[in-house]
Image (cartoon, rainbow, N blue to C red):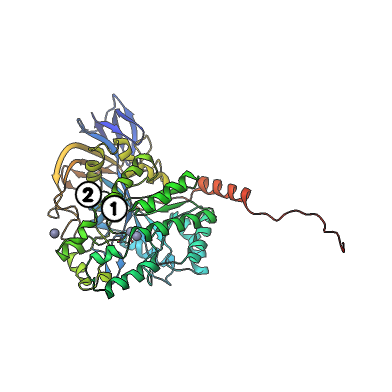
Amino acid sequence: MSILIKGGTIVTADLTYKADVLVEGEAVRAIGAGLAGEQVIDATGCYVMPGGIDPHTHLEMPFMGTTSADDFLSGTSAGLAGGTTMVVDFCLPAPGQSLLEALGEWHQKAGKAAADYSFHMAITWWSEEVWREMAEVVKRGINSFKHFMAYKGSLMVNDDELYQSFLRCAELGALPLVHAENGDVVARLQQKYMAAGTTGPEGHAYSRPPEVEGEAANRAIMIADMAGVPLYVVHVSCEAAHEAIRRARALGKRVYGEPLVQHLVLDEAEYFNPDWEHAARRVMSPPFRDKRNQDSLWAGLASGSLQVVATDHCAFTTEQKRMGLGDFTRIPNGTGGLEDRMPVLWTAGVRTGRMTMNEFVAATSTNIAKILNVYPRKGTIAVGSDADIVIWDPEATKTISAAGQRSVIDYNVFEGYRVTGLPRIVMNRGTVVYDEGRLEAEAGRGRFIEREPFPAVAQALSSWKALTAPKPVERGAIPAGV
Ligand code: URP
Ligand code: ZN
Ligand code: ZN
Ligand code: ZN
């Protein structure tokens, strides 16, 4: 069965041009004019773009005494309805648990995914067993390891563990990721605000100021440099962290930064809302920031010091958020966004002139496909690439609302936001999975996408490290008894 996408304008990270796309089976077979297909989709007036990749989701994840509400079916369905055809979720071993055992559990949960998926492996504790299993994890198609510098007492790792794990990543040609917040300082600030009677959601923001993020980002960058490994900083929310990344890149370090769509358009005023539920629903780490930080993040995307826009989709219902009534430290951390990432970024980014269409494609798909080493299978429209394609209607509009969303939670942090620019048709590996508002995704049709380690970056860094490593001074024989 072949499908011809006809009359549209192809937009990739580097090109905008009019051409038809012939899809055969799961892949793009040809691009050009005068092609024929058994089925024809008219894309006149639309942009034909690579499917979005969201590299940061937490689906059905046990966290803070509960489990995130969207599972791999509702989460990937939300993604598809918003133009995202692949998610990369975090496999989170409990401290002390075997990485391979946790990986088995994640594969089990992901069996019902409606879109393609991959995993990052989290390093939540350290031992020789973890060191050994990391190699097996890489063999099983995972080339990225996540480290939490926050969540003291549960997921947090210390600097020694960070350095050990980064060294192991360097050996394996894998990419370390960090959640950059100083967990020790956060824990002290949480105690301080609770003791002072600030028990509401605003205490969450007060106890996680930009300084804790900037400090941890700097620390991780320096430790990664000493270990000779590239680094990816997730959910960069503020100028303090962006500045650290920008400076590192200017010094030639391979450091990547990922802002979230939430931080680009929402700000800390949400936590001062007198309605406790409104504020608690927006509790996530790092918190939404003073608006000034948004200009920094947008500038980073335009100038290339930040590369990727993700969601950190980790959705909790209002009922779950109420676990933290009277104690903000118990509000489950996380917000949704999978269905809204691309329309919101298009509206706030492309339509305002803060980014070009090509930069939009780079930030939502191409850059992360390259960083995670699945390019050009994913992340572009090219002959031989997976037919993950979004036919984007730049004039379609809607007002975001929890009513009708695919996520199972009972609210949406973007409620009332008017978007212009929406997917009309979405294809994942050659199958139309979303068509004019109708989701045709089936549970279990998503596939695990294996990712090879990165020989090029690892070799470059290890050659340079070997060349510039401290060496003993050659002094010849020391004359005896002078
Ligand atoms: O608040 C958040 N971000 N929840 C999900 C876990 C994490 O830190 O990414
Ligand atoms: Zn995080
Ligand atoms: Zn409200
Ligand atoms: Zn996260």
Q: Secondary structure at mark 1?
A: loop
Q: Percent position (x, y) of residue 27?
A: 34, 39
299 left or right of 135 in image = left
Q: Are marks 1 and 2 in contact (CB under 8 Å)?
A: yes
Residue under circle 2? 340
13 left or right of 346 in image = right
Question: Looking at the image, which residue sits at the far front?
Answer: 196
Residue under circle 1? 311
At 33% across and 46% down in the image, what residue appears? 296
Relative vertical location of residue 296 with respect to residue 91 in this rendering, above or below: above
Front-lying residue, 52 or 439: 52
Q: Secondary structure at mark 2?
A: loop
Residue 60 in view here: no
Residue 330 in view here: yes
At 86% across and 62% down in the image, what residue appears? 480
CA gap between label 1 and label 2 equals 9 Å
The amino acid type of the residue labelled 2 equals Asp
